[in-house]
Amino acid sequence: MIDRMVHPAPASQFDRGSFYRFPRCCVAPIGLLFALALAGCEKAQSQEAAPTPPLVTVAQPVKRTVTDWDEFTGRFEAIQEVQVRARVGGFVNSVEFTDGAIVHAGDLLYVIDPRPFEAVASQAQGQLDDARAKAELAKRELDRGLNLVQTSAVSVQVVDQRRQALQAAYAAETQAEGALKAAQLNVEFTHVLAPITGRVSRHLVTPGNLVQGADSGATLLTSIVSLDPIYIYFDVDEATYQRNSRLWFEGKRPSSRDTSNLVQVTLTGEIKPSHEGKMDFLDNRLDISTATLRSRAIVPNKDLSILPGQFGRVRIIGSSPYEALLIPDTAIATDQSRKIVFVVKADNTVDVRPVMLGPLDGGLRVIREGLMPEDQVIVDGLQRARVGAKVTPKKAQAPADDKAPAGARP
């Protein structure tokens, strides 16, 4: 058996850590490569730290002539509304209208049994004929007495008595005429006629039922409301009333008391006004419980589509025409209690402008203060805009009704 012996190498061949030593000729190139790598990393980081400014859409304010409108909630009411009641008592013979139909003044609605009233009228006619005959006889006797008194055939006292009898006969004739007219009116009242033109409600009494006349609590038969034109009532708050009064004193707005100012009405479910009317009435005092002024406009209703009781939004002129700057409502942001817009300056940096808003007009918001016609307002991309940061502005397309922005107009 041969023993294998490992002889350690001489210390001169291997030193401690000799496996980690490199030749000196390789040290310089490795350091140069490391420096180049670091430089490349720093360059890449600098490129990532300076990205392209975000893209935003800008537009100049639109300049045009506008008129302010005040808007209120109103309720429609009929100009004429009649509760049709029986004027004489009796049994209903027939109903002569269709429920909910349009009726005209004078149309027959109900027929009440007229026979009892016709009998009374005949009796009154007989009494009138009798009174007229007695009056004629009394006149002849008086004429005869006047002739006889000249020859002293009769005394003056007899003549006076005959004169008094004639006057009594005339009075009886007048009473009989009145009784006949009353009886004829009762006959006429048995035919219930529509007093106005409008839409009738349903019939409340069916044939065969007994109704009471005006003397004993008139029975309600139906109702009629007029539809064309129609009123709309609304309440104006005190601040608006004072502002409009001030404009009237300054000659900038006509008063609705003296002028039939235009109003526009938007019905429930509509997004823009569909009817126009005119102011018709302002109350003489403010309601002390609500501090509002009851107002009324009259609106044509040719198609009879509006019914009493409906709600509507009423717009009334709040100023005379004036030049204004307008921007899309979406370009306006809120900063706590103030409204702001973002504009792009000449160096493409973003700036913020506090603005005072006016009403909407044609889908655009009126800006009363805070903007100039030449300002470039950010209308799209607000979430990418930061005050003081650079952006890449892109011009927005001009609205269809305004081919050029305000700053480009002469």
Image (cartoon, rainbow, N blue to C red):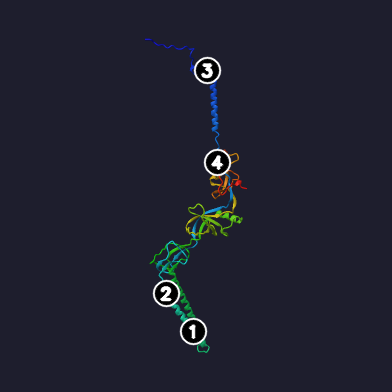
Q: Which residue is mark 3?
A: 23
- Going by the numbered disc 3, the residue's amino acid type is Pro
Is label 3 or label 1 in front? 3
Residue of label 4: 56
Distance from disc 3 to disc 4, alpha carbons, whole Å, reads 60 Å
Residue 107 x/y as whole percent? 45, 66
Rounded to the nearest angstrom, the CA distance separating label 3 from label 1 is: 171 Å
Q: Residues within 10 Å of mark 3 (few under 14, many from 20)?
A: few
Distance in Å between CA atoms under marks 3 and 2:
148 Å
Query: Residue 255's spot in the image, x, y percent?
Result: 58, 58
Q: Kindly identify which residue carries mark 1.
A: 140
User: Which of 240 and 333 lies nearest the eye of the viewer?
Assistant: 333
Picture residue at 48% right of the left edge, 55% below the top: 311
| Eye-nearest disc, 3 or 2 | 3
Q: For mark 2, give the secondary structure.
A: helix
Q: Which quarter of the picture shows residue 339?
A: top right
Rendered view: 359 above or below 128 = above
In primary-sequence order, the first of circles 3 and 2 is 3
Of the numbered discs in the image, which one, if any, rests on residue 120? Answer: 2
Q: Residue at x 57, y 55 (%)?
A: 244
- Amino acid type, callout 4: Val
| Distance from the alpha carbon under mark 2 to that under mark 4 | 92 Å
Q: Quadrant of residue 100?
A: bottom left
